[in-house]
Amino acid sequence: MTVFPDVFTEMAVLLLLAAAVGAICIRLRQPLIVAFIAVGIIVGPSMLGWVSANDQVDLLAKFGITLLLFVVGLKLDLHIIRTMGPVALATGLGQVVFTSVVGFLIGYAFGMSPVTALYVAVALTFSSTIIIVKLLSDKREVDTLHGRIALGFLIVQDLVVVLVMIGLNTLGATGDVSWSQAAFAVLVKGVGFLLFVGLAMRYLLPWLLHMLSRSQELLVLFGIAWGFALAALGVMLGFSKEVGAFVAGVSLASTPYRDALGARLTNVRDFLLLFFFLDLGAQLDLGMLGAQLVESVVFSLFVLIGNPLIVMVIMGALGYRSRTGFLAGLTVAQISEFSLVLGALGLSLGHISAETMSLITLVGLITISASTYMIMYSHQLYEILAPWLKVFERRHTHREMGQDAVPDDAVPLVLLFGLGRYGNGIAQTLRDRGWRVLGFDFNPDLVRTGDVMGYPITFGDAEDPEYIKTLPLAHTYCIVSTVRERDINLSLIHSLRGIGYHGKIAITAQLQDDVARLEHAGADLVLVPFIDAAREGADRIMAQEPVQEVQR
């Protein structure tokens, strides 16, 4: 019997407790996943027994997972895989195969059934893209060589987990049907599903997004609705909501609105995922921990040590330095939220027991906590272990020749917000003088003119801090804003300086009175169009040759 008068009060208490424990975790530099699972354990039947709103929490948890897969698909950047070449695919697939095989053998040695051992082994292969991107961003290492390689093989892992989910749902739906018939049915449904999405991408989505983007709220609402609709369609076709949501995200990934949409959805996703981890924690039976302690420690050590080692072996064989291999390898030293999703899927299909799910969750808690510290202090760890890590390095590290710098044509030199007459004039002048320009504007009509203008234009909001985090800042020389609104420009400056951007910032002011405030906020250059134009006009007049004699 619940201690709260109604469900609303219970949910309010859960949120307050999650916020309090989350604050403690942040102080300890732990990811919030650990805090949320801990709250689930505290309020679950193993301790306080407060949770009774199981249906509501479960529904919100399903929303969170659907949105998670949608955002992953939305941000699927195949360009990273192409630019990293063989290393992303070789490392991603090699690590998945190695971890799956060795993990299966360890599970089988502990007396697990083949199906249970396979689930545990596959769950150990996936690393948390969300946690890794967050940690690398905090350390400003996303655009380093090891950061780009890590993102490449994390994308490979994300693709593999989607394929695994499709296979598991097929396995769960076979019943009395033969494997060949089930596989054929999945193939037909899959082709039909992808054909429908492909036609929508070609004929429907560009026009629809262009129309809806005039309202940010409507664009976000459509993105969520589209993701949930394809998730429901995926369930109807016998796949899963995760697969459908992932495909929905991929269908929007090639549009100029993907970064703006993804930035707006990030906070919604994180809030809804709270309930997924609360639900997982509430299902964790503390009475089983003693019986599973040995297994959880062994599997955790395998993930913390074995996964980085196989990455170092593969990258060393491909010609990378031991330092690069070590720093990239540490990013796979934990299991991810996808591992927990996979375990929850297996539990719902009846393939594994609650004890196995508790084991996977416990390994997740241990590895996520430990790997956070390993990544935070990765450079110090390398200095300590460097003498023993040279064995993973070939004599000639040819792969790193010129890799630490991004090719000139891969990243724009100037990011320019606001492409009205003044902004476009600046962009065209910079291009004429050999500078690279990437334009951003809030007007969807201007976004469609990118090819005509001669430089790429994408849909972007200078006032959105989450969107600013998605920009390619590491190799950008200058960011220019020709937006006239002072508050938007102040927000842009604070966002850029807050995430550690040290390049030049040029801001446009509408009034002379705003110049001092923008400079105090951190702008390196403040442009005042009318005053600057007047001075330029005067300079051009004064540059003319003086007339010696005026003709009457």
Image: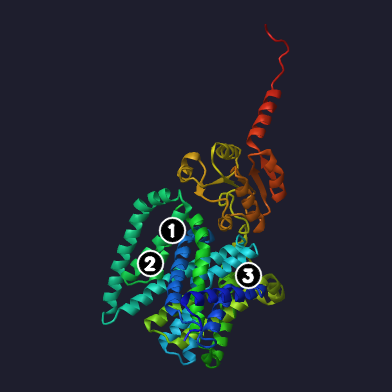
Q: CA distance from mark 1 to mark 2?
A: 15 Å
Q: Position of residue 86 (x, y in %)?
A: 51, 64
**Which is in the foreground here, disc 1 or disc 3?**
1
* Any part of residue 417 in sight: yes
Q: Which mark is residue 231?
A: 2
Mark earlier in primary sequence (1, 2): 1
Q: Position of residue 504 (x, y in %)?
A: 67, 48
Task: Pick whichever, 539 or 317, lies toward us.
Answer: 539
Q: Position of residue 125 (x, y in %)?
A: 50, 76
Q: Position of residue 221 (x, y in %)?
A: 43, 58
* Secondary structure found at label 2: helix
Q: Is residue 452 left or right of residue 383?
A: left
Q: Residue at x 34, y 51 (%)?
A: 203
Is 182 located above or below residue 476 in the figure?
Answer: below
Q: Look at mark 1 in the image and give the residue it sits on.
A: 221
Q: Amino acid at mark 1?
A: Leu
Q: Residues within 10 Å of mark 3 (few under 14, many from 20)?
A: many
Q: CA distance from mark 1 to mark 3?
A: 39 Å
Q: Amino acid at mark 3?
A: Leu
Among the 4 quarters of the image, the one containing residue 56: bottom left
Q: CA distance from mark 2 to mark 3?
A: 36 Å
Among the 4 quarters of the image, the one containing residue 365: bottom right
Q: Amino acid at mark 2?
A: Ala
Q: Which mark is residue 327?
A: 3
Q: Residues within 10 Å of mark 2 (few under 14, many from 20)?
A: many
Mark earlier in primary sequence (2, 3): 2
* Any part of residue 98 in sight: no
Is 370 located above or below residue 482 in the figure?
Answer: below
